[in-house]
Every structure is written in structure tokens, then in C-alpha cells.
Image (cartoon, rainbow, N blue to C red):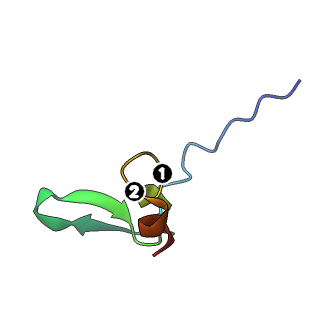
């Protein structure tokens, strides 16, 4: 069976931006899905 191995350089050219004063790097292109998973968002908030 073939085990998938992701290319190690797949993020080398990704465009990132700094978020707020923390300097956290986040992708410039995002679909906002990081905000709608887990218990921190209600269904109404996640749909916005």
C-alpha cells in the first residue's frame, strides 16, 4: 500500500500576512474555516 507523503516544500512560496501586534503569520488566502470549527462558535455565528 502506498503511503501519501506531502511535498516538504509545499509552503515555501505561500503568501502570509502578520496578524495584529503578535506578529502571528497567517495565510493571505483563507476561507475562514478556522473560525467555525469547535465549540467556540454557534451555528448562527459560523454562517456569517
Q: Residue at x 17, y 59 (%)?
A: 23
Residue reaching furthest right?
A: 1
Q: Which residue is mark 2?
A: 41
Where is 34 relative to 28, above or below?
A: above
Which label belongs to residue 13? none
How far, Cα to Cα, is label 2 from label 1? 7 Å
* Residue 19, quarter of the rendered image: bottom left
Q: Residue at x 36, y 50 (%)?
A: 40
Q: Secondary structure at mark 2?
A: loop
Q: Nearer the viewer, residue 18 or 13?
A: 18
- Residue 28 lies left or right of residue 8; in this view the side is left
The mark tally for this picture is 2
Q: Nearer the viewer, residue 3 or 34?
A: 34
Q: Which residue is mark 1?
A: 37
Residue reaching furthest top?
A: 1
- Residue 10 lies left or right of residue 13; in this view the side is right
Amino acid at each position: 500500500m502506498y503511503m501519501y507523503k506531502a511535498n516538504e516544500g509545499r509552503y515555501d512560496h505561500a503568501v502570509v500576512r502578520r496578524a495584529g501586534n503578535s506578529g502571528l503569520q497567517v495565510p493571505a488566502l483563507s476561507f475562514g474555516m478556522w473560525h467555525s470549527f469547535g465549540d467556540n462558535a454557534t451555528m448562527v455565528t459560523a454562517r456569517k
